Amino acid sequence: MADKKEVLLKLLIDKNLDGLLLTDGYNIHYLSGYSGHEGCMLVTKEDTYIFTDSRYIEQSGKQAPNAICIDIRGKSYSYRINEALEQAAKGSGRKLNIGFENMHISYDQYDKFSQTLSDRVNFVKLDNAINNLRAVKSDWEIERLAKAEAIGDKAFQHIISFIKAGMTEKEIAAELEYTMKKLGADGTSFDTIVASGENSSMPHASVSDRVIGKGDFITMDFGCIYEGYCSDMTRTVIVGDDVSDKQLEVYNTVLRAQLEALKLVKPGVKCSDVDACARQVIADAGYGDYFGHGLGHGVGLFIHEEPRFSPKCDAVLQTGVCITVEPGIYLPGMFGVRIEDMIVVTKDGYRNLASSPKELIRLSL
Ligand SMILES: [Mn+2]
């Protein structure tokens, strides 16, 4: 927390703010250590406050020992924040410039804050300022991300011997999630995707009762949370030994796109250029219309963070950024393929946190 306070003080000075009012649970967790996801946080030059309710007050005190933790007990958040600001203003009467998370607040909550605090406060939009602080991971964070991804690798190793023709997608998804939890995961980092046969043409298909059969592609996109940090990986496998020429061509195109994009990864490279590289490989193979989503996303306390591998992302890679590389090709009504690793940008390139094989795996029936 001590080093984070320094970063926040710099932000206050750079943006000419008297304080920050944070409402995003992940940002509060990142900046204070408090992971309860109920409450808000006020940072002034002097003090850090966490406001929460009686269910979380003890937890907040343990996890965020440097913050003043306040139980809102019978009052609204804005009432308790107003009390704290009254002290911070020390009766000067000057209006305070307070940064707020315009990207992470409901209209209703903003309305309540405005009504109670507008005599005392000018609200200033923070946009992505706090989210951007989270893009570069510390060694401590990378350890946890690596452990989460390693749990995913182990679960994948198990699932490829578990899957048999005749099972449903739901059975496979349940086994993946159970396995990750048994291996020490706190939970899943998003809803597990198991998309088989024609369902695999939908990048984020809902897990269904579809029964797995011979010749099906199965795309499994899954991840877990370990000590707060998320993992994410995708593998596509085939059931049985018979692969059609079309399936193999699409699979190898996706794999080539991923490997080519990975070769570009190092500090200083523009995120949109890495995305463009994979997109070009897929377009050259004639499948440009069938890769609609971005190539990847940052991962940390939350599954989708900054920066993004997308045509729109001007951010430049920095050492310590954790990001996925996940090209796909999706042929409606037929099948789809996606291959995804989670990597950390290093001084000279990247470290792949995933170690599961990427050559097409043919499952025994
Ligand atoms: Mn992903």
Image (cartoon, rainbow, N blue to C red):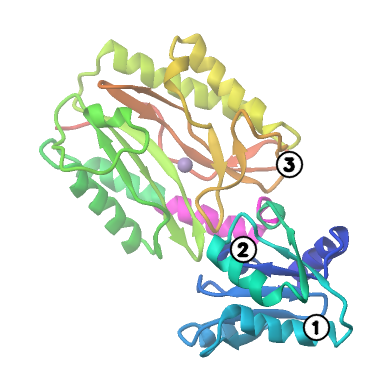
The x, y position of residue 337, in whole percent, is: 36, 27
Would residue 1 be found to the left or right of residue 247 on screen?
right
**In the image, residue 302 lies in the stretch drawn in magenta:** no
Q: Which residue is mark 1?
A: 88
- Is 80 rendered above or below residue 40? below
- SS for dot 3: loop
Comes first in the chain, label 3 or label 1: 1
Instruction: Answer whether residue 145 is magenta in the image.
Output: yes
Q: Which residue is mark 3?
A: 347
Q: Say which amino acid is labelled 3.
A: Lys
Q: Amino acid at mark 1?
A: Ala
Query: Magenta region: which residues?
Result: 133-151
**Residue 193 image offset from top left, x and y in percent:** 32, 43
Describe residue 343's horizontal placement relative to residue 214 as left or right: right
Residue 338 in the image: state x and y as whole percent: 40, 30
Indicate which disc residue 27 carries.
2
User: Could you tell which of marks 2 and 3 lies nearer the N-terminus?
Assistant: 2
Residue 223 visible in rendering = yes
Q: Which mark is residue 72?
A: none
Disc 2/disc 1 C-alpha distance (Å): 22 Å
Label whose residue precedes the other's in the sequence (2 or 1): 2
Residue at x 68% of width, y 51% of height: 128
Closer to the camera: disc 3 or disc 1? 1
Q: In percent of the image, x 42 and y 32: which residue is there?
A: 339
Camera-side residue of 154 and 334: 334
Q: Quadrant of the N terminus?
A: bottom right
Q: Give the position of the C terminus as an image quadrant.
A: top left
* Predominant SS of the magenta segment: helix
Q: Amino acid at mark 2?
A: Asn
Tell me the crowding category of disc 2: few under 14, some 14 to 19, or many 20 or more residues within 10 angstroms, Cα based. Answer: many
Q: Quadrant of residue 137?
A: bottom right
